Image (cartoon, grey):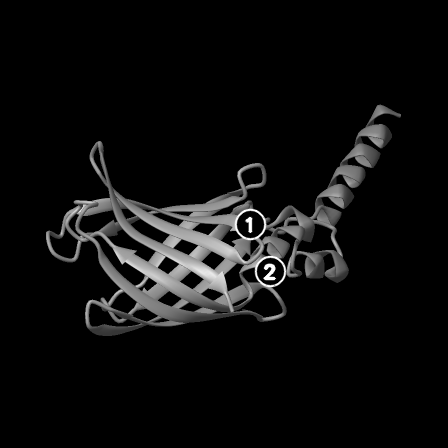
Amino acid sequence: MKYILAFLFLLSAMANAQTKDTTVQNPYAPKILEGGSVGELFKLTQPLPEHQILLQLEGEWKQEIKFYFSGDTSRVFKGQGETINQMVLGYRFLESKSSSIAFGMHISSISYIGYDNRLKKYTIYTMDEMGTYAVLAFGDYDDKAKTLTFTGNEIDPVTQDPIKFIMKYSFAAEDEIEFEVDLISGSKVRKYLEIMFERK
């Protein structure tokens, strides 16, 4: 009798081995894919409430610009310009195109601001005619202070030294936005740029 039981146990073990799923699982795959539906995955591609913050930047704006190249806030290079901001790609990103005149130069710039649902961070990718490189930064929105602040790391185009920067949008009023850029080298913080946007 015991031989019959052992034989039945062996058959059961072999059957389980044949039906066991031996597929190698990707440990980095989004958990939504584990038994999730296409509809659930589609939700991850849609704009979020965080994207509503970017609507404050939409529209046409006048710029009043102040550059502080030397770090001496008493030495200011001023300029003026215009900006057109619009939501693109199904309200997933804000496209910002600016044209300005400062210290006798015409400067054009393009920026894209979004919210990365993977990182739970706002993103900004910006480029202009003052360099041959683009700048990328990540940030957060402070609802109490009404500020959108980005931080990033770059290389100083003159000294080639690493440098940290902070970009901050302050939503002071419905039709006014203040934009600031500070550069951080070691323990030193230097004001670099201020732009006051006024809605047309």
Relative placement, left or right, of 179 versus 67 is right
Quadrant in the rendering for residue 81: bottom left
Instruction: Determine the CA span between mark 2 and mark 1.
Output: 21 Å
Task: Please name whichever residue, 92 or 118, is drawn nearer the observer in this view of the structure.
Answer: 92
Secondary structure at numbered mark 2:
helix
Outermost residue to the right: 1
Looking at the picture, which amino acid does disc 1 mark?
A: Arg
Q: Is residue 5 above or below residue 176?
A: above
Q: Residue 118 carries which label?
A: 1
Residue 68 position in % (x across, y down): 22, 52
**Mark 2 or mark 1, whichever is nearer to me:** 2
Secondary structure at numbered mark 1:
loop
Look at the image and tell me in which quarter the N terminus lies: top right
- First-in-chain label (2 vs 1): 2
Relative placement, left or right, of 84 versus 162 is right
Looking at the picture, which amino acid does disc 2 mark?
A: Leu
**Residue occupying image coordinates x 56% and y 65%:** 58
Q: Are marks 2 and 1 in contact (CB under 8 Å)?
A: no
How crowded is the residue under tag 1: few (<14 C-alpha within 10 Å), some, or many (20+)? few
Q: In this view, does 68 lie above or below 38?
A: above
Q: Residue 55 carries which label?
A: 2
Residue 198 position in % (x across, y down): 47, 61
Residue 169 position in % (x across, y down): 45, 50
Relative placement, left or right, of 149 versus 73 is right
Residue 154 position in % (x across, y down): 26, 51
Task: Please name whichever residue, 92 or 145, is drawn nearer the observer in this view of the structure.
Answer: 145
**Residue occupying image coordinates x 28% and y 65%:** 79
**Residue occupying image coordinates x 28% and y 56%:** 66
Task: Please name whichever residue, 83 or 63, is drawn nearer the observer in this view of the structure.
Answer: 63
Task: Please name whichever residue, 46 or 156, is drawn nearer the observer in this view of the structure.
Answer: 156
